[in-house]
Amino acid sequence: MNRSIALGLVFSALATNVALAQTSKGTLELEVSRASEGELEVVLKNRSSDRVKVSAVFNENPAFGVLNFNLSEGGHRYGPTFPPNENLPTDSAYISLGPGDAFGHIYSIADLMHSYEAKSACVTLVVTYRDRLAAKFRAFDGSIKARPIRICSSRQGQVRGV
């Protein structure tokens, strides 16, 4: 359903929805944007002048996951229809982002909408990064919510910003 994208890359600003969070050492940014036809990229960027430790495992487990995908349409919120089958993270699941570094994953829009059994062809998506185990691993212990974007699953894999 997702694949990692390299650390420190520059990403397209098309259909970008950016959210910023202040860390004790500076700014961390969550960006959701179009990667290519039918794909979204969810990226954390370190905009501070210091290193920031974050989870490199963008899992969706409601108990300890770091990403929450909120898909909704017309007041109805879609929840994941699959039970997460993931292991608890270890210290090796964390990376240290240097100033200007970025890390993220690419998600298939069709797979995401299928996993949440979205009935509409287009939904509003809000992505939140919040690591519930961050304190244990001395990592960024805040929450960042990206701005809502409109995504559509079709044969063309359209993505539109709200």
Image (cartoon, rainbow, N blue to C red):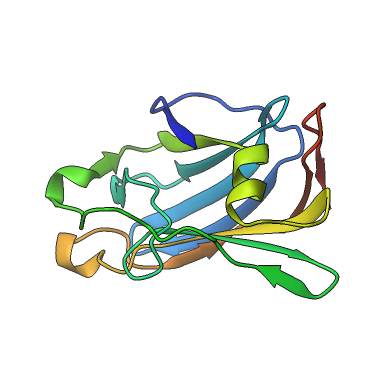
The answer to whether 129 appears left or right of 53 in the picture is right
Please state the horizontal and vertical placement of residue 80, each as a whole percent of the image. Answer: 54, 61
Q: Residue at the location (70% across, 71% down)?
A: 77
In the rendered image of this protein, does residue 35 appear above or below residue 25? above
The answer to whether 107 appears left or right of 117 in the picture is left
Please state the horizontal and vertical placement of residue 44, each as a whole percent of the image. Answer: 47, 45
Q: Nearer the viewer, residue 125 or 14?
A: 125
Please state the horizontal and vertical placement of residue 4, each as a whole percent of the image. Answer: 41, 30
The answer to whether 83 appears left or right of 128 in the picture is left
Q: Residue at the location (74% across, 65% down)?
A: 72
In the rendered image of this protein, does residue 31 appear above or below residue 132? above
Q: Residue at the location (32% across, 37% down)?
A: 98
Count of marks overlaid on the render: 0
Q: Residue at the location (82% across, 55% down)?
A: 120
Q: Residue placed farthest to the bottom in the image? A: 75
The answer to whether 99 appears left or right of 91 in the picture is right
Q: Nearer the viewer, residue 25 or 147?
A: 147
